[in-house]
Every structure is written in C-alpha cells, then in structure tokens.
Amino acid sequence: MSDKTIVRTTCPRDCYDACGIAVVKRADGLVKVLGDPEHAVSRGALCGKCAIAYNGAWLDPKARVTRPMKRVGPKGEGRFEAVGWDQATGEIAERLKDIVSRQGAETIWHTHYTGTCSLLAGGFPQRFFNRLGASEVDPDSICNAAGHAALQYLYGASNVGFDPRTAKDANCIVVWGANPFASAPHQHKHWLKETRAKKIVIDPVRHPTAADADLHLQLFPGSDAALAFAMLHVLVREDRIDRAFLNDHTIGWAELEPILMRCSPDWAAPITGIPVGKIEEAATIYGDGPSLLWLGQGLQRQPTGGNVFRAVGLLPAATGNLAKPGAGFLYLNGGARRGIDSDYLEAPQLRQGERRKVSHMDLVATLSDPRKAQALVTWNINIAASNPDQARLHRVLRDERLFHVAVDPFPTDTTDFADFVLPAASFLEFDDIVSPYFHLSMSAQVKALEPMGDALPNQEIFRRLARAMGYNEAELFEDDRTALDAACRQMGLKDFASLAAKGTVDIWPEPVLQFADLTFPTPSGKIEISSAAAEADGHPRLPQPIADPRPQGGLFRLLSPASIWLMNSSYNDDPKVAEKLGAETVTVNTADAARLGLQDGDTVIASNETGQLELRLGVADIVPAGVALSHKSRWPKLSKQHANINALNPGRKTDMAESSAVHSVEVTLTKKA
Ligand SMILES: Nc1nc2c(c(=O)[nH]1)N[C@H]1C(S)=C(S)[C@@H](COP(=O)(O)OP(=O)(O)OC[C@H]3O[C@@H](n4cnc5c(=O)[nH]c(N)nc54)[C@H](O)[C@@H]3O)O[C@H]1N2
Ligand SMILES: Nc1nc2c(c(=O)[nH]1)N[C@H]1C(S)=C(S)[C@@H](COP(=O)(O)OP(=O)(O)OC[C@H]3O[C@@H](n4cnc5c(=O)[nH]c(N)nc54)[C@H](O)[C@@H]3O)O[C@H]1N2
Ligand code: SF4
Ligand SMILES: [Mo]
C-alpha cells in the first residue's frame, strides 16, 4: 500500500490561471501542496507565491485564525479572547437584531470581494445578507466596475470573452493594460510563449511580458483612448476596416469616423509618448488579424477608464475581429457563460427591503456617518490594506461605535479592528467549485485537509448566523452537497462527484466563438459604438479621443499594480514571502532620478494631499519619465509606518460606475533628510 495519498484540487484565488493543485499527504502527516502535473494550466508548477504560502502560512496554525475571537483590547490592537461558535454567533445575532429594530437593517453594511473565488464561499453568504436586508459595498468598485460598465454599453456584455484555446488561430495577440507575468503567470509562461501570433503589449511599464513581446507600446498612463483612436485612424487610412461588418453589426460608425479622421498618429504621438511608426505598426499587425485583444484590469483603473474601454473596445468591431477563430476580446469570462445561475446561488427572493449599494470609494464617508452605518461585516476582503484613503479608513474602523464582524482565515489588519473575528476554513479544507475567468473550463475544489481548529467554510458560518438570528427560510440552510450538485447540473454535468473525479473539465470540447451568432445583448442588438444608453446615464454618446492631463510641477503618476509575490494583500504574513518581497520600493527611471539627485537604494518620502509613505527608491528604465511604480497591498501592520501604498490613494472615482481610479494617484518624491 502506498504511504501517500494525493488529492487533486484547484486554486481559487482571484487569478486568471485557476491552477490545478495536487495535495500530497504522507502517512506520517506531512503535507505538500504542489502543482498538478496533469493540469493544463499549472502543468506541475504553482506560481512562486502560492508554492511558498500554501506550504507555509496556509498550513501553519500559528499563522491562522483558528477560533472565533471576541475583542478584549481597544479596536485595532488585535487583542482578542477565544470564544465558542455558539457564544460568538449568539452575541453577534443579538447585536444585529438590536440594530435592525432601532436603526434599521440598512445601517448594517457588508463588504466582500474575491479573497476566495469559489462559488459557495464566494456567493452563498449573500443569501444571509439578502434575508437580513443589509446594505452592500459594491464589490467590483474596488477593482473593475468601470470596464464592465463600458463593455456593457458597447457590446451589451462584459463577461463573455474569447476562448483562449483559439490562440492557435490568431496572428496577433494584444495585451493591453494587463501584466500576465505577475497576474496570470502561467499565461505568460505557456499561453503567450507557445503562440505563433505576433504579440503586442501596451503598457506604461516594461514588465517581463512587455519585454518579451514583438512590439511594446510604452505609453503614458491614461492616454489609451488617444492611442486607440490613432490606431483606428491608421486602419481607416489604409483601408483595413471591415465595412461590411460595421454595416451589419454596429451602430454609430458614421458618427465616429469624422472624429477619428482628426486623430492621426502625428496628433497622438506627443499625447501618448508613442512614436508614429510604432502606432502604425501596431495598427497594421492588429488589422491584418485574426487578432485577440486582452483588456487588462489595470487599463480601466483610470479617471477616464470607462472611456478608455469604450475606445479600445472599438478595435474588434472596426476590424470584424469577432465570431471567427483567432478573433475576439477578453476582459473576464464569467460563470454565467457556463450556465452558472447566480440567482440560485444568492437567493435574491429572500431580499428584505431595497438593495442599497455604495462604491468602495465612498466607504469611509459611509462608515463615518452613524445615521448610515451602525455595523460592518467584512468577509473575503481586507479593506484595511487594499482600500483607498487608508489613514481615514483606519480611523473610522477604530471607532467603538461601529460594530464590526470580520471573517477571514488570517489575522489581517482588517480583523484587528473587529469586535468579533470568525475563522474561515481555507480552500484546502472544503469542497467547492472554481469557475476560471480566463479559460472556459470548470474545476472542482476538493477537500484535502480537515478545517484547522474550529474554522468553518464561509457558507457554514453564515448558516450558523442565520440560525442564531432565528431565520427559517430553507435556502439559508441548504447543505453544500445539494448546492454543488445543483451548480454542476446547471453546467450540464452530472453532479459534483463527477466533476471532482475529473478535476477540471472543458465545458466545450472545441474552442467556442465569441458572439458566434453576432447578436449582442444591447438595446439595439448591435454593437453600440454610439450609445443612447450611455448618453442617458450622463456619458457622451461616443467614445472620446481624450487623455488625462500629465502631472504638473514635478509630480509623478504613481502606478501600484499586482506584485508577483502577493495575491492582493494575501501572503505577506508568510515569512518566506516577506523575504522575497524585501523592502517596499518605488521605481522611477534614470532621467527622473538624476533630475531629483536621487540614487538607487535611497530612502524617499512619497507624499500628496492624502498621505505620505517612506519607500526605498529603485532606479530602472522600465517606466517612462514622470511615472513611478510601486506594488499594491502589503500588510500595513507589518511596516513600521502602519501603512502601505494606499495611504497615498485618495480614492478617486472612474468616469463610469464609481470604480477605483487607483492608477491615477499623483505624488512627489523627495529624499529623506
Ligand atoms: N494601490 C492599489 N490597491 C489596490 C489595487 C491596486 O491595483 N492598487 N487593486 C485592487 C483590487 S483589483 C482588488 S481585487 C483589491 C483586493 O484586495 P484584498 O481584499 O486584499 O484581496 P485578497 O488578498 O485577494 O483577499 C482578501 C482576504 O480574503 C481572505 N480569504 C481568503 N480565503 C477566504 C475564505 O475562504 N473566506 C474568507 N472569509 N476569507 C478568505 C484573505 O485571507 C484576505 O485577507 O485590492 C485593491 N487594492
Ligand atoms: N501576482 C498577483 N496576481 C494577481 C493579483 C495580485 O495582486 N498579485 N491580483 C489579482 C486581481 S484582484 C486582479 S484585478 C488582477 C489584475 O491584474 P491586471 O489585469 O494585470 O491589472 P493590474 O495589475 O492592476 O495592472 C496591469 C497593468 O496595467 C498597467 N497600467 C496601469 N495604468 C495603465 C494605463 O493607463 N494604460 C495601460 N495601457 N496600462 C496601464 C500597469 O502598468 C500594469 O502592468 O490580477 C490578479 N492576479
Ligand atoms: S494564484 Fe494563480 S498562478 Fe498562483 S497557484 Fe493560484 S491560480 Fe496558479
Ligand atoms: Mo481585482
């Protein structure tokens, strides 16, 4: 008999890759979490951060929250006593019921995002909050809501992307404002390396994916709409536009064409910082097609991010790069595409009262107003590290008046502020389903280990809270297996056991065409280049050839995208990951460093009207002049300053959907005296 068992499961992080995992359990109790060699994406290797953290902090009871905890010290100090589940859920329910009867359920806010992306742990708790009648912080407004809104105006859908398997049919792949090297490491390592297509990367940062590309357009942040208009100008000039496609499947091209005829590459070059020849080359390669366009999430985290998406999103429409092999665009491939019914998962029929939402950009203001907010529940999210306006957010979270329950597997900055911390089981400890947002497959998350201590999956935590509240609707208590089997049937699979036996299944055996029938879920059924719906919502009818003004007076535009060693704020507590991360740096180019009399390794102060932060200076010609690069979401409490890069982020909103324009932060950099 073998002395080890292997459980095959899936990584449910907010990552394009959704790697297959092999958990190897030895008879002596030793556990190793490895990449599954048979999985098409991971091919035997996890990314560096998960390879470390899943064998480090995630398996370490001392690093985890393992018992329900009740606060004993002042808020923010992280001093708690362990209590039992019944006491914790009982006391929380009493407090919530009191708030419901005095101030109303709408003053109870919950905020959640993609700490885990698996279906039940990500969606099932909504049933509880619907029944409670709580208000919700709009989840996507911290990440990607502007891009969704823009693509919905243009194509009527933002969650229907190309099938990555069609890369074999493409002659060109454009990666526009994404950094696969960090945020989709296996797509960098395999998918992009194995294609014969010409690769064009459009990004202010010369990251390794950009450096590997056939063509890198290193534009100034926030100038993408101007670049897209100039590319369209070239396509018209060179007669590479698909006029039959435009006639049959779009509305508004006639209004747009005169505008883009004024947007020559000569006009765009000084605005974007891209030489005329490179704009022409990119347009020509894309226009020859078939071409795939990957719209990154970094691309829309700009003050005019919605407009950027509407402008860049014109390229497939103008060139007929849809509904054929090797063509299409991708923002995210959503679960609904595979039949997943989010209404089943979240049970909106339980909703008590009106559904209220605010943007994450308004979270501080909302929590600061006692008429609006009496309680906060945070789950699958670490707002104290990842949200804007960090100092003010920490201040309001410290207010004893606000009743705060945090659910997390780890003791984060956010849980430190809570009145109760509830221990969430990790993905290794329960069954669930992962719906990848790049590939169109579906994967099983299979329980490999027992939950640590008293930890429970999110869905069970909210069942217990529902019971303590005295609710009795059946949906609140549906068991995991029934819900998992139902979700599998929605996708045309027999049941969860059959999915688990396969690990990952391709829902379609062959690559599917994006918008195969060329009908679009817009009001007109066509691609709406000119959009009455956008206009009715207060936006221009057409995408605009505009760019953000360059920072003035020696300010830098600060970009803070994904780090290769962190998953948002996750893993910073793992000592080996922390060692890889090293000091928190900000990188500028050689000319800017020389102008400021700064050298690599200097300690600098980054500051603006929102805050200041001490950082180590890196000097490297990977960013254009006037741009500074740092990475997001370290744990504030692990730094002497009790802050991270979001101490500098005012929380400016995008033009659409009140989403985060985090890549528009401006700072000065000065040498520390
Ligand atoms: N400066 C700057 N800030 C940014 C960004 C940026 O680009 N720049 N990006 C933004 C973006 S895109 C995002 S998505 C946010 C995300 O930012 P975060 O909220 O920090 O995201 P994560 O670290 O993915 O997950 C949040 C928490 O979920 C917990 N978690 C994991 N599994 C489970 C589980 O099963 N149950 C429960 N209850 N909790 C679990 C993790 O331990 C973690 O503490 O950050 C935003 N912040
Ligand atoms: N390792 C790792 N992987 C992750 C995450 C992580 O934190 N770490 N986070 C996950 C999450 S929640 C998300 S949302 C995704 C995000 O992953 P991505 O979609 O890759 O988004 P970002 O990391 O914000 O930024 C991507 C790129 O956008 C560029 N960019 C910034 N401003 C502009 C601009 O104005 N124009 C253009 N063209 N480019 C611009 C940045 O320089 C950066 O290289 O990654 C996921 N994967
Ligand atoms: S975070 Fe992404 S790359 Fe890393 S193991 Fe998970 S799915 Fe794979
Ligand atoms: Mo995100």
Image: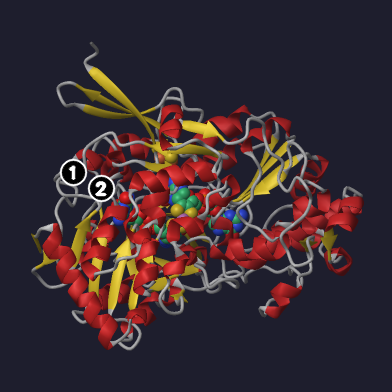
Q: SS at mark 1?
A: loop
**Whether label 2 touches label 1, CB < 8 Å:** yes
Look at label 1 and name its amino acid. Answer: Met
Quick one: label 1, few (<14), some, or many (20+) residues within 10 Å? many
Counting residues from the start of the chain, the first of labels 2 and 1 encountered is 2
At 48% from the left edge and 69% from the top edge, which residue is drawn? 666
Q: Where is residue 172 in the image (x, y as percent from the top left)?
A: 72, 38
At 37% from the left edge and 33% from the top edge, which residue is drawn? 9
Q: In which quarter of the image is the C terminus?
A: bottom left
Instruction: Say which quarter of the image contains residue 552.
Output: bottom right
**Disc number at residue 425?**
2
Decide if residue 120 is on the left or right side of residue 455: right
Q: Where is residue 67 in the image (x, y as percent from the top left)?
A: 14, 53
Look at label 2 and name its amino acid. Answer: Ala
Q: Position of residue 522 (x, y in %)?
A: 73, 64
**Disc number at residue 185?**
none
